[in-house]
Image: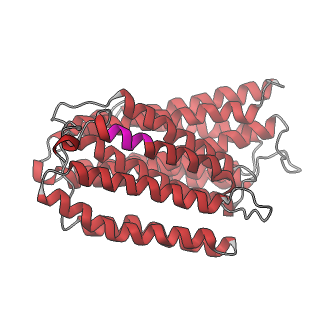
């Protein structure tokens, strides 16, 4: 046991993200691309809703390892070995995501069951690794409290995967998420997580967010295909790039450093709770919004390149419009939420911008695909212009 316990290294306040953790993030974003592909074939309200459910499970799996990497170095000894095993399970889950609701009666890979078991393996490995490196009674108590709803959630996932129809599977998987993540967060209120390095935790989330923005760029290529067939496709690709730039500026220009400063300035006993709320919870709508915007960009490019149908008026289908505008609105709402949870200050411009995007949604549904994308870029450019003229969020006091 002494030999095993020597094979990990606890982190300090100045700990930063390791290259191994960035490797882990690449597997996460690969899974994200598979979710976008799942929602695009075809893009309907059902597939977009199921895609959100898959991303909920994926996000909180990734978040669990962000906490583990804050406690001990992820690239040392048994933690690295266990995390590599978890990455393998996450990779397998990503591979079967496009068939997550398909039943193969010919003896092929049972994708729903493989996905459920892979998710359970990712979470179980995290729990075992965290228990192995736990150095305090409070941390051990937190892990044990989280394990109870976790195991129940994993069982529900397996039962849902074995269900006979898609609706039952969706309901059971949604319930599994509520039990696993919701139950875990409820239990953790009585025994909060401990955060060792604010700089590492903030950097982890900055890096995964910028990699997720890269998914929007990947979607440009996926939607356009192997060749730029028309000038309209080229223009749409440039608008997709401008969209990614707008999303990047709205987070990284001023908000990202303010969030880290606020977390570092939070008293140590409350730092874990603030990190859990601001980053683990409130960054979910940010990346979910990026995911839907990426889907909308892909749908717009595919429509213009004639790889996907447009309706008789030449407009982008409503699922694509909803993905673009509701996704961007979700991103702005998430931006307001993280600022509120981190600094205690309500920032109105992101909320107003989110509301305006939702108001523009039916208008965009009447426009040609290229014009709908151009309108979104214009709205984001206005949002950026408004944001840069306001006092920095870091001028506020940390949440207490």
360 lies left or right of 388: right
Q: Is residue 83 magenta?
A: yes
Q: Residue at x 82, y 44 (%)?
A: 308
Judging depth in this view, the residue of 12 and 304 nearest the camera is: 12
Q: Is residue 391 visible?
A: no
40 lies left or right of 276: right
Judging depth in this view, the residue of 112 and 211 nearest the camera is: 112
Magenta-highlighted stretch: main secondary structure? helix
Which image quadrant for residue 17?
A: top left
Q: Residue at x 67, y 46 (%)?
A: 37
**Residue 101 x, y percent position in the rendering:** 68, 62
**Residue 358 x, y percent position in the rendering:** 57, 54
Q: Residue at x 29, y 46 (%)?
A: 68
Which image quadrant for residue 206?
A: top left
Judging depth in this view, the residue of 79 and 308 nearest the camera is: 79
Q: Give the answer, above or below, for where 257 lies relative to 299.
A: above
57 lies left or right of 12: right
**Residue 374 x, y percent position in the rendering:** 66, 35
**Residue 343 x, y percent position in the rendering:** 23, 48
Q: Of all residues shown, which one is farthest toward the right?
A: 312
How many numbered discs sit on the rendered protein?
0
Q: Give the answer, above or below, for where 269 lies relative to 106.
A: above
Q: Is residue 26 visible?
A: yes
The C terminus sits in image quarter:
bottom left
Which image quadrant for residue 78?
A: top left
Give the residues in magenta: 79-84
282 lies left or right of 313: left
């Amino acid at each position: 046991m002494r030999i095993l316990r020597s094979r990990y290294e606890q982190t300090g306040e100045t700990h930063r993200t390791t290259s191994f953790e960035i490797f882990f993030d690449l597997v996460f974003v690969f899974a994200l691309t598979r979710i976008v592909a799942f929602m695009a074939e075809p893009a309907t309200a059902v597939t977009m809703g199921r895609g959100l459910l898959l991303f909920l499970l994926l996000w909180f799996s990734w978040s669990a390892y962000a906490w583990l990497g804050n406690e001990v170095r992820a690239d040392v000894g048994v933690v690295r070995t266990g995390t590599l095993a978890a990455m393998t399970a996450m990779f397998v889950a990503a591979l079967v995501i496009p068939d997550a609701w398909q039943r193969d009666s010919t003896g092929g890979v049972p994708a729903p069951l493989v996905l459920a078991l892979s998710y359970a393996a990712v979470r179980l490995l995290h729990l075992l690794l965290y228990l192995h490196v736990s150095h305090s009674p409070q941390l051990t108590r937190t892990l044990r409290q989280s394990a109870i709803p976790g195991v129940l959630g994993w069982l529900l996932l397996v039962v849902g995967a074995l269900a006979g129809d898609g609706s039952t599977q969706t309901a059971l998987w949604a319930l599994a998420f509520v039990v696993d993540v919701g139950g875990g967060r409820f239990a953790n209120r009585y025994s909060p997580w401990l955060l060792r390095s604010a700089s590492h935790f903030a950097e982890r989330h900055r890096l995964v967010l910028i990699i997720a923005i890269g998914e929007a760029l990947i979607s440009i290529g996926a939607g356009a295909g192997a060749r730029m067939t028309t000038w309209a496709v080229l223009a749409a690709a440039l608008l997709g790039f401008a969209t990614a730039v707008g999303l990047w500026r709205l987070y990284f220009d001023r908000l990202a450093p303010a969030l880290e400063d606020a977390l570092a300035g939070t008293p140590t006993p409350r730092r874990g709770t603030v990190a859990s709320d601001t980053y683990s919870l409130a960054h979910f709508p940010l990346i979910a919004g990026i995911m839907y915007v990426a889907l909308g960009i892909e749908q717009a490019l595919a429509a213009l390149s004639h790889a996907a149908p447009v309706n008789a008026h030449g407009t982008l289908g409503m699922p694509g419009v909803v993905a673009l505008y509701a996704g961007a609105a979700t991103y702005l709402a998430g931006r307001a939420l993280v600022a509120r949870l981190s600094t205690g200050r309500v920032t109105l411009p992101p909320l107003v911008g989110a509301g305006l995007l939702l108001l523009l949604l039916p208008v965009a549904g009447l426009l040609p695909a290229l014009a709908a994308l151009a309108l979104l870029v214009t709205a984001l450019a206005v949002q950026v212009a408004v944001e840069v003229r306001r006092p920095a969020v870091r001028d506020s006091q940390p949440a207490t």
